[in-house]
Image (spheres, rainbow, N blue to C red):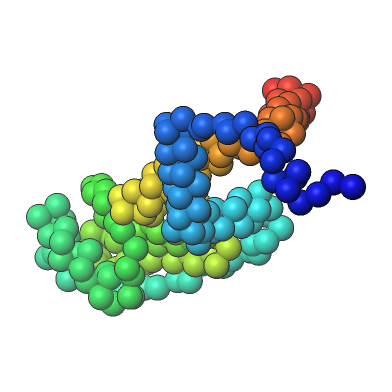
Amino acid sequence: MTTTSSLQNKPQTKEPVHHVPLWKRKTAHWSRWLHTYLSMVSFTILLFFAVTGITLNHQAALTGEVKPQRYTGTFDASVLKTPEAKKDEIIGTVRGRHGIKAALSDFRVDNDQVQVSFKGPGYAADGFIDRGTGKYEILESRLGFVAVVNDLHKGRDTGKVWSGVIDASAALMTLVSLTGLVLIFFLHKRVRAGLYALAIGTLICYIVYVIWVS
């Protein structure tokens, strides 16, 4: 029988210690930190673009036929003698009378009429002003919630600020993807399976493009 004293006197074998280089530990730490918090910071906007990708892909099924709203009115004919000089007054009057908040997209002066257009996400208003009589007509189209979010997804008629949001979102998506890719290399038991999954996903996209798109 082995005694306690003999066990204590038996030389102990030490497990080999694997020293992970400092740069690897730092890379793993910062990749994990960035991936976690960038994902949380960008969660809402990433979810928005994911969902609107579906609504945009099925736009015809999700949006119904919209009948434009018609407005009429009259300008003082003297204003229309020099419409270029009175542009701000004309635009301000149209906005004030009909509650139009979308950005001005076009202001065109012809011999017989003045044309004004306003565009926004899911919104359009086109006006035609007769320079001889001062009478005008505006056709306003509100295309609904789905059209609004689809235009926000595409950045159409949304202005410079929202364009910056789209750029920032694209940058965040890129960083989240890259930090996730870096992290897989530190999960030694799963790195091979992870890279296989990456290759399969890429190959599926390529095959779909080659067979059904190109």
Looking at the image, residue 60 sits to the left or right of residue 161; the answer is right
Residue nearest the observer in this picture, 193 or 85:
193
Which residue is located at x 16 percent, y 58 percent? 87
Residue nearest the observer in this picture, 123 or 148:
148
Q: Position of residue 21 (x, y in %)?
A: 46, 30
Looking at the image, residue 184 sits to the left or right of residue 28; the answer is right
Q: Quadrant of the C terminus?
A: top right
Whether residue 99 is visible here, answered yes or no, is: yes
Whether residue 113 is visible here, answered yes or no, is: no
Which residue is located at x 46 percent, y 44 percent? 29
Q: 107 above or below 200?
A: below
Q: 64 above or below 60?
A: below
Q: Position of residue 128 (x, y in %)?
A: 34, 59
Which residue is located at x 48 percent, y 71 percent? 69
Residue nearest the observer in this picture, 83 or 192:
192
Marks counted in the figure total 0
Looking at the image, residue 55 sits to the left or right of residue 72; the answer is right
Q: 209 above or below 67?
A: above
Q: Position of residue 5 (x, y in %)?
A: 73, 48
Residue nearest the observer in this picture, 129 or 179:
179
Q: Position of residue 161 (x, y in %)?
A: 31, 54
Which residue is located at x 81 percent, y 49 percent? 3
Which corner quadrant of the image does residue 127 belong to?
bottom left
